[in-house]
């Protein structure tokens, strides 16, 4: 039986290994770091631990069903629903709470933003149809053969999804108050996109929060990596960490071998799970196929260990600036650090005591910033955000901090994220769907790819869906090279 060699043990590579090994295929993982999971890992300090990257668990059914297909039962995945979903706090003192429950949400809108109730109901009805259409025609299909995308049916679907609009323009069709528009467009930042540059199909993320809920994984999202790794080890999947691939050998239309840490590996099929644009370094002979990509936004992340828990807060909160549009312009166009940033906080200790010593807690703050910028004013920005946190929800915060670490796009780029962007390439129109790198990105018969920069895109469940598309693609006979069509 041939073997699949996976270069990179991020969530895309791990799910690929899980699905293939459950079909009794031979799998090997080569991971350059000393740990698995990629950006889905922990920041640790003594007894404190907190997710380094992703925190909000979305699309739970997609996540659970893919794990189940890979042989991990649902009862092994410790996710719990967040209700309310989260708070959004505006700088004028007004707040807006999101709920999965329809009646609670309508009551919240009636109290806070009267006159927008009908628009919200219209939003839910329209998005329900668009979500089902988008899932069927784009999330559940790959476009290795680009001709399968440019069909009359797909183009009609794109028109119905209003892909020619951006997310912000679409939300203004439903909400009269600009603060509500912000509340239903900020979700593009989950995948590093500008609300005014991301196609309207990404508005389905904000709909999904209400339809499918926002969830939390007990022990942190990185607990998922531990569960998958335990299963792979039980199956005898070979996993080599501290093993960075330096070069490849190609004969005609196939990779025949890899070299990592001075050791040669013969290969049958290869799956690349690095941040895709950076994988080009391994393929100098195919330089002519390269294109210029735009990276997603970056993040300044502040991790804190506290000597208390702020039980009056929700797990997830968004703190909006006076001028969200200005913040987005500074991030995506001017490429400067924001002077009045919006930011997100994650305080899982309100429901999970396993992340810190008894009676203590952890807190994570994310500030959207450019992926490339002048970082000399980073410390001043961090201080400004902590000051805002103290004023708007975390009273006397500085006096309760026992540990703090700051991570910037500089560290992200050093760790292998394209240009320091936190979410792969940006979800712009011409980097989405068929225009995004596909699961077979090179004209090589035995080389495939998975990850946030590969179709269908970023976000943990979506990357997992990309791994499912890849393993479904590999189901036909691996010896039939005619099956493999060129992709881009």
Image (cartoon, rainbow, N blue to C red):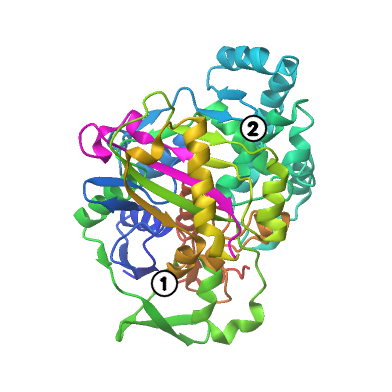
Task: Kindly tell me whether residue 469 is visible in this rendering.
Answer: no
Q: Tell me where residue 291 appears, x and y as whole percent.
A: 67, 73
Q: Quadrant of residue 415?
A: bottom left
Q: SS class of the residue under badge 1?
A: strand
**Residue at 53% across, 38% down:** 388
**Residue at 31% across, 56% down:** 21
Direction from residue 118 to residue 79 in the image, left or right: left
In three-dimensional space, the C-alpha distance between marks 2 and 1, rounded to whole angstroms, equals: 44 Å
Q: Which residue is mark 2?
A: 183
Magenta stretch: includes residue 67: no
Relative to residue 227, is residue 210 depicted above or below? above
Check residue 269 in the rendering and tell me which mark sits there, or answer none: 1
Q: Are marks 2 and 1 in contact (CB under 8 Å)?
A: no
**Neighbours of disc 1 within 10 Å: few (<14), some (14-19), many (20+):** many
Q: Tell me where residue 362 appears, x and y as whole percent.
A: 33, 40
- Between 226 and 177, which is closer to the camera in this rendering? 177
Relative to residue 86, is residue 305 depicted above or below? below
Q: Tell me where residue 427 appears, x and y as whole percent.
A: 64, 53
- Between 416 and 455, which is closer to the camera in this rendering? 416
**Residue at 76% across, 27% down:** 174
**Neighbours of disc 2 within 10 Å: few (<14), some (14-19), many (20+):** many
Quadrant that contains the C terminus: bottom right
Quadrant that contains the N terminus: bottom left
Q: Which residues are magenta?
A: 345-372
- Between 20 and 17, which is closer to the camera in this rendering? 17
Q: SS class of the residue under badge 2?
A: helix
Check residue 31 in the rendering and tell me which mark sits there, or answer none: none
């Amino acid at each position: 039986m041939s073997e699949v060699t996976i270069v990179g043990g991020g969530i895309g590579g791990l799910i690929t290994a899980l699905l293939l090994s459950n079909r009794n295929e031979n799998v090997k993982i080569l991971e350059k770091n000393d740990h698995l999971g990629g950006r889905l890992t922990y920041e640790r300090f003594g007894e404190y631990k907190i997710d380094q990257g992703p925190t909000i668990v979305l699309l739970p059914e997609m996540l659970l069903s893919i794990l189940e297909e890979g042989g991990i039962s649902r009862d092994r995945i410790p996710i719990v629903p967040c209700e309310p979903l989260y708070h959004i706090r505006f700088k004028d003192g007004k707040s807006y709470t999101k709920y999965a429950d329809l009646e609670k949400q309508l009551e919240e809108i009636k109290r806070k933003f009267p006159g927008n109730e009908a628009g919200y109901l219209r939003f839910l009805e329209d998005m329900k149809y668009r979500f089902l259409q988008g899932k069927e025609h784009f999330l559940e299909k790959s476009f290795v053969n680009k001709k399968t995308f440019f069909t009359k049916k797909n183009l009609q679907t794109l028109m119905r999804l209003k892909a020619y609009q951006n997310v912000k323009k679409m939300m203004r069709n439903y909400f009269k108050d600009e603060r509500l528009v912000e509340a239903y467009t900020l979700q593009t930042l989950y995948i590093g996109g500008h609300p005014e540059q991301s196609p309207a199909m990404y508005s389905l993320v904000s709909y999904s929060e209400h339809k499918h809920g926002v969830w939390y994984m007990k022990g942190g999202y990185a607990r998922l990596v531990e569960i998958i790794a335990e299963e792979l080890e039980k199956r005898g999947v070979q996993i080599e960490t501290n093993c960075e691939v330096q070069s490849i050998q190609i004969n005609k239309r196939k990779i025949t071998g890899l070299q990592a840490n001075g050791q040669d590996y013969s290969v049958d099929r290869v799956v690349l799970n690095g941040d895709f644009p950076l994988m080009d370094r391994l393929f100098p002979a195919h330089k002519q196929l390269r294109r210029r990509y735009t990276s997603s936004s970056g993040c300044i992340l502040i991790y804190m260990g506290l000597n208390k828990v702020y039980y009056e807060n929700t797990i997830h909160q968004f703190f909006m600036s006076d001028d969200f549009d200005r913040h987005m312009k500074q991030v995506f166009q001017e490429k400067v650090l924001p002077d009045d940033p919006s930011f997100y906080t994650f305080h899982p200790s309100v429901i999970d005591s396993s992340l810190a010593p008894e009676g203590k807690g952890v807190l994570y703050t994310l500030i959207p910033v450019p992926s490339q910028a002048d970082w000399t004013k980073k410390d001043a920005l961090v201080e400004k955000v902590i000051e805002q946190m103290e004023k708007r929800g975390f009273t006397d915060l500085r006096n309760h901090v026992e540990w703090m670490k700051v991570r910037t796009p500089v560290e992200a780029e050093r760790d292998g994220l394209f240009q320091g962007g936190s979410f792969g390439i940006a979800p712009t129109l011409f980097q989405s769907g068929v225009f995004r790198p596909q699961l077979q990105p090179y004209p090589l018969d035995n080389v495939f790819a998975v990850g946030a920069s590969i179709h269908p895109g970023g976000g943990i469940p979506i990357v997992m869906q990309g791994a499912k598309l890849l393993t479904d693609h590999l189901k036909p006979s691996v010896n039939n090279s005619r099956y493999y069509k060129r992709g881009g």
